[in-house]
Each structure stands twice: as C-alpha cells, then as structure tokens.
C-alpha cells in the first residue's frame, strides 16, 4: 500500500506573491517567500473500471535538504518526477537575468534564505569571489598531488592545492592563471596569482 503525501494546507502570508513555474504552469507555483505549491485542479482518470473525476487540493509542497545544504522540491508531470533547487525556481520567476548568467548567489550566505531580495544571478567566478570575500569558502589545506605547486590568489587571500582546483573554484581558465604566475600578464579578471 503506497503512502499518501502529507497534506500541508496553505497559510496566507502577508505580501506573498505566487507565480506559475515555467514548464509546470497549470500544476505548480512558486512564491516570493520561497515556497512552492501544487495548484488545485480537477481532472479525469481512466482505469479498468472506467472514467472517474479526481481532485487535487491546493497544497504546499514539502522541501527537503539536499546533500549540499540547499532546499529542493520534487515536481511531478506526466508520471515523471524532477527535483529542483528551490532558490533556482524563485530566481527564475522573480529575478530578471538580462545577461543570461547561469549561477545564483545567496547574498547573505544563508543557503536556506530563498527570498528574491537575497538572491542574485551571477557567474561561477562572481559566486566564488563572493564566497571568498564573505568567508563562506575556506582556503584548502594539503595538496591533491605531492608534486603540484600550491597557488595563492593574492587578491582574495585564497590558497589552492593545484592549478586545476583554482580553475574549477574560480571559473578562470588555468592558462590565464598560469600566465599571471609566470609574469606574462599582470592579472586575470582583476585577480593576481603566485606560486607558494
């Protein structure tokens, strides 16, 4: 016997605005308070017995914590489920993205604070720089490869165990970082690097 999903009634929050979720317009909506609801609807179900009318009550979708500390919600459509990061759903519906940036930054550093005022579209580099400047990302200790040279980003005061790690965290091509280290360029995207 399958478990029924818990019914979480919608409590009104003053100033809350709901917008349909792109691709799920008739099924789900997201709010500026960082909540997702199933939109109430009637529909017909056909089975071996015949056709019957079903009703889905409007309800709040439960959010769960992912392994990396973000809230996620599961949305169902056409008998398939897909999980979405809650902050991404809020940003897509409430925050303009004219530069088509791919990542979303939590301005105050709190991953569970998913209101539009706390979210901004950013690049991977901008996200990493914000994390470094606010102390959310700590310098790495130890190395991945005993022969790899440790790298210091003097602009941010951030250490990396190797060139690939600096590239991945900051989203800057390793050749650009290498040119700065080897004094072929003064900086890359305003960041200065040196070997340790």
Image (spheres, rainbow, N blue to C red):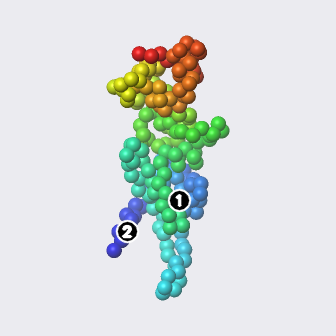
138 vs 82, left or right, is left
Under circle 2, the secondary element is loop
Q: Which residue is mark 1?
A: 28
* Residue 99 higher or lower than 145, as above or below: below
Provide residue 46's location: percent of width, then percent of height: 53, 80
Residue displayed at 54% across by 50% down = 17
Instruction: Name the side, left or right, on which 44 lies relative to 151.
Output: right
Q: Nearer the viewer, residue 95 or 196?
A: 196
* Image spot of residue 2 (x, y percent): 36, 71
Count residues near mark 1 (Cα–Cα under 10 Å), then give few for <14, some for 14-19, many for 20+: many
Quadrant hosting residue 113: top left
User: Which residue does the numbered mark 2 point to in the structure image?
Assistant: 4
Q: Is residue 177 visible?
A: yes
Q: Which residue is located at x 44 percent, y 50 percent?
A: 72
Q: Residue at x 42, y 47 (%)?
A: 71
Check the image and report above or below for 188 versus 88. Answer: above
Which mark sits nearer the N-terminus, 1 or 2? 2
What x and y, as percent, mark residue 85? 47, 48
Label total for image: 2
Name the residue: 59% across, 57% down: 23
Q: Tell me the quadrant of the picture where the N terminus can be found.
A: bottom left
- Quadrant in which the C terminus is drawn: top left
Label 1 secondary element: strand
The one of 11 and 77 positioned closer to us in this rendering: 77
């Amino acid at each position: 016997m399958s478990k029924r999903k818990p019914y979480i009634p919608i409590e009104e929050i003053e100033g809350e605005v709901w917008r349909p979720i792109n691709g799920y317009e008739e099924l789900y909506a997201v709010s500026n308070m960082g909540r997702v609801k199933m939109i109430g609807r009637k529909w017909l179900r056909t089975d071996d017995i015949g056709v019957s009318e079903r009703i889905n009550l409007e309800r709040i979708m439960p959010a769960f914590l992912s392994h990396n500390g973000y809230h996620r919600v599961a949305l169902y459509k056409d008998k398939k489920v897909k999980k979405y990061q809650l902050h991404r759903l809020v940003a897509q519906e409430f925050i303009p993205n004219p530069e088509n940036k791919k990542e979303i930054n939590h301005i105050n550093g709190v991953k569970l604070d998913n209101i539009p005022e706390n979210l901004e579209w950013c690049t991977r580099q901008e996200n990493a720089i914000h994390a470094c400047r606010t102390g959310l990302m700590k310098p790495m200790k130890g190395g991945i490869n005993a022969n790899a040279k440790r790298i210091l980003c003097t602009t941010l005061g951030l250490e990396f165990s190797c060139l690939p790690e600096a590239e991945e965290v900051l989203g800057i091509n390793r050749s650009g970082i290498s040119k700065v280290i080897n004094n072929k360029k003064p900086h890359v995207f305003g960041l200065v690097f040196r070997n340790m």
